[in-house]
Amino acid sequence: MVPSGTPSMTIFRNPKEVKPYIVPSPERCNLPAAAIHASSDFLIIVDINAPAAHIAQHKWQPNTPDGQGMPFLFQHGKASAGSTGGTFMRMFKGPTGSGSEDWHFPQALAFPTSGIRSSDVVSITCDKEIITGGHVDNSVRLISADGAKTLEIARGHCAPVTCLGQSTDGNYLVTGSRDATVLLWRIHRTSTSRSSSMSELSTDPGTPTSSGSNALANNLADKSRRRRIEGPIHFLRGHHAEIISCCVSSDLGIVVSCSHSSDVLLHSIRRGRLIRRLVGVEAHAVCLSSYGIVMAWNKSLHTLSTFTLNGTLVARAQFPFSSSINCMEVSADGQKALIGLNSCLESDGAFDNSRHLKSKMPGTEDLSDEENRLDIPSPSICLLELPSLKVLHSMKLREGQDITAMALNKDHTNLLVSTVDKQLIIFTDPALSLKVVDQMLKLGWEGDGLSPLMK
């Protein structure tokens, strides 16, 4: 863990110094991933596999050199031999060390549907639990990362969930469905259920208790069983076809969604009302910046656009017709974006579409195609400034390394990328880990634990 007082540095500050590091033994990393969550000590990875979603936990310590060339410590996931609970578990045997531990990963949860095929229907919470959609019973499910147990099932849609998203603070969940509706849910943290469940254990069955004590215990037990996924608290309407992307921001109080019927819609969290319709804006993926910017990707025209919450077009970038955006991550301050650009074989009609960009995108009369045409190779990761979409830096990946999932750790010092060729790549500035070690020494840290870091 980075000691307090360490100078604030992120991969956005000096992106040209950021380098890729491939995690060894990728066959143990549960890849390719549909979703990745990076905390200060754990990585949780949900893979793309039908008909089951496999969940793996790995220990890691970012910004701490391992003494063998990696600027982070990484230990492949282990679980005790008795930890089960999924519908089935796939096991990979590896070195047992002392003989008391085996490799047990990834844990797998069977789905009664086609499974997790993209990041659109899976998300990982702040409590390191997994939320999934895409089920044939139209439900949303909360799944534990430890044991792959189904903790809760929530229903509200009349058709399978096709996309979902969480607010950055983890308080809200938004889901889109084939039924053309968007639902808003409230997410409760685990801390409340833990404190309440302890009260259940406080009554000894062998000890007589008063009726008042029993009533209090029952009341606390009811609270402990409060649903983690509350709702739906709002039904957000206005689309006329399947929802293909949605996102939510607690800070802005906004839900953004798009569907196959065109038009990007903005609803309020507080009342669930439609507050803005971006008329004629066709999008296949949307993303919200805390800076108050909506990003909209149009895969037919290969354009990425930024809008204000009032619906005013700010900028538009034309990407090569040989590429397509698969992942978008936004910095905490909302002023920068990371784009995962994949190779794309779609070429039919591409140049015909480009001739009609202005007629299809309202408000683009003053934007020059030449000034906003980006010549970026794919696959690659592109760092953009918001809302101007100015390219700050791009990192080229090898051919065949299309991106399936991306995740920033909390302090934005590491970017984790899963590729279709089953690699886990961590992008970071190697100088940062050396500064962390230096800071630890200045703070008086000592012991054998630092010796491998000094190699």
Image (spheres, rainbow, N blue to C red):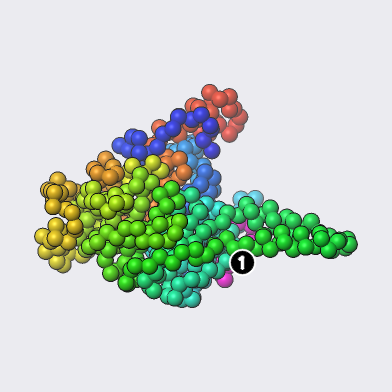
Q: Quadrant of residue 361?
A: bottom left
Q: Position of residue 432 (x, y in %)?
A: 42, 33
User: In this rendering, does residue 421 appear at all?
Assistant: no
Q: Position of residue 442 (x, y in %)?
A: 53, 23
In the image, what residue type sits under mark 1? Gly
Q: In this figure, what is the number of numbered marks?
A: 1
Asked whether 133 falls inside the magenta stretch, the response is no
Q: Position of residue 218 (x, y in %)?
A: 74, 63
Q: What residue is at 32 percent from the left and 51 percent from the top? A: 309
Q: Nearer the viewer, residue 129 or 251?
A: 251
Q: Nearer the viewer, residue 266 or 175?
A: 266
Q: Nearer the viewer, residue 187 or 274?
A: 274
Look at the image and tell me in which quarter the N terminus lies: top right
Q: Which residues are magenta?
A: 79-89
Q: Quadrant of residue 225?
A: bottom right
The residue carrying mark 1 is: 85
Q: What residue is at 49 percent from the left and 63 percent from the top? A: 233
Could you tell me what secondary structure mostly forms the magenta stretch? loop
Q: Residues within 10 Å of mark 1 (few under 14, many from 20)?
A: some
Which SS class for mark 1?
Answer: loop
Q: Position of residue 270 (x, y in %)?
A: 45, 56
Left-right relation of 125 to 192: left
Q: What residue is at 53 percent from the left and 68 percent from the top? A: 154
Left-right relation of 289 to 96: left
User: In this rendering, does residue 356 appear at all?
Assistant: yes
Location of residue 112 with respect to 142 vertically, above or below: below
Location of residue 450 with respect to 393 vertically, above or below: above
Asked whether 83 falls inside the magenta stretch, the response is yes
